[in-house]
Image (cartoon, helix red, strand yellow):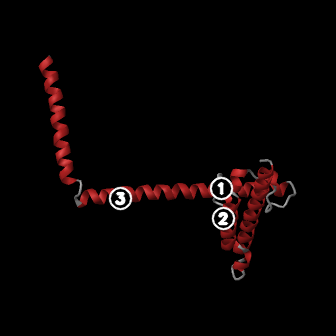
Amino acid sequence: MGKAKHLGKGAILLGSIIAKVVWDQVKDTEFVKEKREQINEWAGLQQRKIQTKLQVLEDEFWEWIKQVEKEAGKNPNVLRDQDITFSQACRILDIPTSADLDVAKNAWKQKMKACHPDLFSNASDTEKQQAHQQAQKVNSAFQFLKKHYQKHSSSS
């Protein structure tokens, strides 16, 4: 029985060596390169799908917030301090939570350059409304962060 175990280990070792030799010979072939590209393409597609789903969920969340505020008789396009958290404000401006006021200000300026309602004067009414809502959201997030930074810098 001991010889059989010894032969089994030898066969496994030999198989590993053969696999390594074969891999070294085929790893740079067009077939393998093509498969690597397909895998990378698939991974990128999966990442884009996840990002799209996250964006849809975020949009659905904000629509839900608007509906709740509308039912409560509030203006659904204006975020108030009690309606937003620090991390939500950072997400709206696409900045890390470790960012300072200057980073937040630069991000706010960049976002406003992209969604300012004046840029949509020739757009459809729906696009104008979306731009207006996005601008309000960006402004509200920045105002929240500005107050947050001022509050925390004065308490330091």
* Dot 2 or dot 3, earlier in sequence: 3
Name which residue type carries label 1: Ala
Q: Residues within 10 Å of mark 2 (few under 14, many from 20)?
A: some
Query: Which residue is rendered at x = 59% and y = 54% of the image?
Result: 54
Q: Residues within 10 Å of mark 1 (few under 14, many from 20)?
A: few
Q: Nearer the viewer, residue 40 or 147?
A: 147
Residue positioned most to the right: 73
Work out which quarter of the rendered image holds the N terminus and state it.
Answer: top left
Q: Nearer the viewer, residue 9 or 64?
A: 9
- Name the residue beneath numbered marker 2: 107
Query: Which residue is rendered at x = 57% and y = 55% of the image?
Result: 53
Mark 2 falls on what kind of element?
A: helix
- Name the residue beneath numbered marker 1: 99
Question: From the viewer's perspective, is 28 left or right of 125?
Answer: left
Residue 106: horizontal and vertical position, in percent? 67, 66
Question: From the viewer's perspective, is 4 left or right of 113?
Answer: left
- Name the residue beneath numbered marker 3: 38
Mark 3 falls on what kind of element?
A: helix
Q: Residues within 10 Å of mark 3 (few under 14, many from 20)?
A: few
Query: Which residue is rendered at x = 56% and y = 59% of the image?
Result: 52
Instruction: Report the mark closest to the observer, 3 or 1.
Output: 1
What separation in Å lies between label 1 and label 2 (alpha carbons)? 10 Å
Q: Find residue 47 and name its label.
A: none
